[in-house]
Structure formats: C-alpha cells, structure tokens
Image: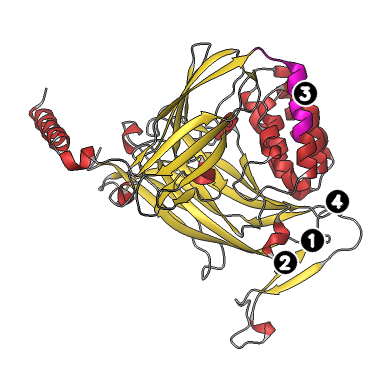
Amino acid sequence: MSACFKRQTIAALLATAAALTAGPLAAAAPAVQLTYSLAQAGLTVNEPVLLKVVAENGTADEVTIDLGTNFYGNFHAKLARPDGRTEVVPKPHEVVFQLGIPGKVVLAAHGRVEKTLLLNRWFRFDVAGRYFLDLELSEPPASLAGSAPQVASRGEIVIDAAVRDPDRLMDICAKLEKDAIAAAPSPPGELGSDEILAYIGDPVAVPYLARLLDEKAWASPMYAQGLGRIGDGPAVEALISHLNGISEDRKPVVRAVLTGVEGRTSDSQIRERIKAALR
Amino acid sequence: MPADAGGAATVTVTSTGYGFGFQGGDSPLSGGYNVDVSGGCPIPTNFAQKATAALNTPAALLMQFTYSWSSSTGSLSDLAACSLTETVSFGGTVGNPSVYFPSPPFPANTVVAGGANPYSNTQNNMSGGGMTDTNGFTASAGDFQHPYSYRGVNTSQAFTYQCTCGSGTPASGTLATPGGYMDVIQNPANTGPWEYINLKGNLPPASQQYGATSSVTLYLGNQ
C-alpha cells in the first residue's frame, strides 16, 4: 500500500467518523415519506403491473420533491426475478435520451400526493413466480443537496405473477384498446390506457397494437415502440406494413424501432426480413 | 405537406419576430415566418429549445433541456392529439463508425437505450406547451475506464410531431434537428485534466434557442 493511498484512506475514515458524529443532521426526521403498494392483485405473466406511490409531507411547510422525468426518472429500482436474475433501473452505463415532463411534485403542509407508475416501463414480468422489487429515489445533484428536502424513499414490494393466461391477456388488451379509442389523450405525464397497452410485452397484444398504430396517428410512435418491444414475426410484419403505408416524414420512428429489433433479435429470419424492408 | 395528405390544406403563416434580411419596425415584413401546412389539423409551431443546468448526480451524468411551443390555432389545448417524438442517431466513434462507446475510455458495457441506432422515444399530448429532454450517461465519473484517450460520439436528434384531428388526414413534420456529441477529451489539449463532455448544439435562431455543454472531470492531471 502506498503512502499516498494510506493518507487517502485515513482521510476517508476521518470524514466518515465526522459524518457519523453529526448527530442532529443524521437524526432529523425526513420531511417526506414515500410508500408503495400494488394497484391490483391477482396478476398473471405479462400483465400490466401498476404501482401506487404515495408521498406524504410530515412538515408544516410546503415541500417540493423531484421524481424525475415523467415521474420515473429519479427512481432507482432493483428487481429480483423468480428465475434468479436481477435487473436494475437505470441500467448501468446505458446512454439515456428521455423525453417527458418535469417530475416535480409539490406537497402542501402535511399533504399527500399519489402517483401511479407502470412497472412494465422498467421491467418485464414474463416468468411466473415471486418478484421482489426494491426502489428508492436517487440522490439529488450536488448543487441541490443542501436545499433538497430529506426524503425517505426506500421501499420493498413483493409481486406474485401466476402462469400466463392468454385469454385473460386478450380481455385486458381488448378493454385497453376500447378505452384508448374512446378516450381523449391523457394529460401530459398521466398514465393512459394507450401507454399501458403499449407496454404489454406479450404476442397477444400484437393485433391490438397494430390496429391502433394505423388508427391513432398521434399515438402511433408509442404503439410502434410497443410492437418493437414484442419484436416477434407478427409484430415486425405489422411495423413493416405500417412503414409502407405512411408518408416519408413519419417513417423515421418506425425505422428506428425496426432497427432496434434487428439489433436485439436472435431470430435470423426476422433480422433478414427487417434488413430487406429497410433497404 | 405530408405526402399522404389529401383534400384541402390549411396554411398558417405566423410572424416569429426575427428577421430574414428585413430590418426593424413592427411591419409584418420585419420578421421571419413559420409556414405550417397541416392538412387541416392544429399543429405545433415556434418550437424552441432552452438549456438548463447539468443534472450530474453520484450515479449519472445528465443534461436536461426544456422545450416550448405554440399552437397554430393559438390555443394549446388543440394540441392534445399531437405527439412529440425524439429520434437520436449515433454517428459512431471517431475513427470507428461502427463502435459507439468504446471502453476504455467509456464505461464498460455502455449501450444505447434499447440497442437501437437510431433510437426513438415519444411523449403523447402536446397541450402542455412544453416538455423536458434528459440526455446523458447512467454512469459516474469513476466508471470511465483507464487508459483515457480521445474518443467521441456524434449524435443527431430530430424532433418530430404527429397530430390528428377528427377523421382528417394526420399531420406530421419536423420541428428541429439539433446536433451534439459525447466525448472523452483532455482539456486544454494534451495538458489539462481528462473530461467527459456532453454537448448539445444550437438551434437557429441563436437569439431564442441555444445549446449547452455539461462536463465532468474524470482525472486531475495527465494520464
């Protein structure tokens, strides 16, 4: 061990000791408490999984917390899956480009706010069994660390998914499609049935997404991306068919989705089909 | 006008207040104009990019921009049936156009979201009149790998919209195409500390819309 490293280690230990003895700060009650619960019970594989997030302000002052872009961006989540794999969000070293609305939430004195998050935006629930979700908000940027309210955001949720039930999934898709057609666009940042449907990563959803892709122009990029996440043969055919029927200025998104499928798929036939379509 | 548009078209001419060769005064001729050919749908106009501070946290090196726009009808609520899509293309590493984020010096196992190039994401409902865009790495300065060397990735973005109105022909178009890059570079060249730089370019006109640079020092001194 070099002398330099020793000096750094000692300095770090002293800094840690100082932090541990900073009693009043360490013991202060958090201004805001986040709690989590599932919005529905009796889930099966590949169903939408909705998480209710409740933020409660324990102080007599108005407090603003930042949940990040679209109310998702500042969460760190870890999912232990029934197949033994662990996934995290955000993915380490992923390059992020995220469009959305600011996730600032204002809490009145002793007030509470509820938000519903779609967990399928982060994870696939594609195996039957028990999932353990661990999540918390990321630390604020250093420039805001002094002024940001203390938030107790760590939470754990258990999610049980029963075996895949195609009939049940079809019922869910049909209801979401009906709602998506009937409903006006959700207010910016609010979860709508179109978004929920676009995140059902099951082949059952393909015909529903394909119909909406053609019918609802304003939401068609979202449906194209939903088909891309499924990425099987019928989903790719629906995307190619749509690509051939739209104007040049609407093609880049569909092309980007197909390129993504081409890069991810292990199916050589799908890869060749996309290559030929994009030529 | 979209190639698949049919029937009558609405042409909206809006004074934007900045010149294309005309000087001064309040005459309509003193300003530039957005000409929107929408096939009858209300569409977004006056798209503007505004830079905000870097959002560098212990776990991520990010920049966030806000965007604003108006409606061709004057009423933002008419844009509820419009979506905004960002499509990002990665130009490849300097000297190797097929490798986007080589490690070293970039963090190991860096991937573009979703594995797509170009990559796209969409936000529905443009009636709010503005949105944010978060760009960057889900990595800390300590995740960058030695030995450092100059590597950069060019990015180009396109912001496009789609709008629908009743049973009319959907309208679509491009709002802006800012460029940028994400580099590991030594500043000043060959003498200063190594930095990760995320730059997003200007959108014309510079008087209203501007880019920004976020930089993080990776290593103090020469490597």
**Residue bearing the label numbered 4:** B4
**Residue bearing the label numbered 3:** A170
Q: How far apart are marks 3 and 2 (CA)?
A: 40 Å
Q: Which one is closest to the eye, mark 1 or mark 3?
A: 3
Which of the image's four quarters has the C terminus of chain A?
Answer: top right
Q: Is residue A99 above or below residue B68?
A: above
Instruction: Give the magenta range.
Output: A163-176
Q: Are marks 4 and 1 on the same chain?
A: yes
Query: On the rendered structure, is A43 left or right of A71?
Result: right
Residue B72, disc: 2
**CB under 8 Å between callouts 2 and 1?**
yes
Amino acid bearing label 4? Asp
Q: Distance between the residues labelled 2 and 1?
A: 9 Å
The secondary structure that most of the magenta stretch takes on is: helix
x and y percentages locating residue A52 in the rendered image: 54, 34
Mark positioned earlier in the residue sequence (2 or 1): 1
Q: Do labels 2 and 4 share a chain?
A: yes
Label 4, residues with CA under 10 Å away: few <14, some 14-19, many ≥20: some
Label 1, residues with CA under 10 Å away: few <14, some 14-19, many ≥20: many
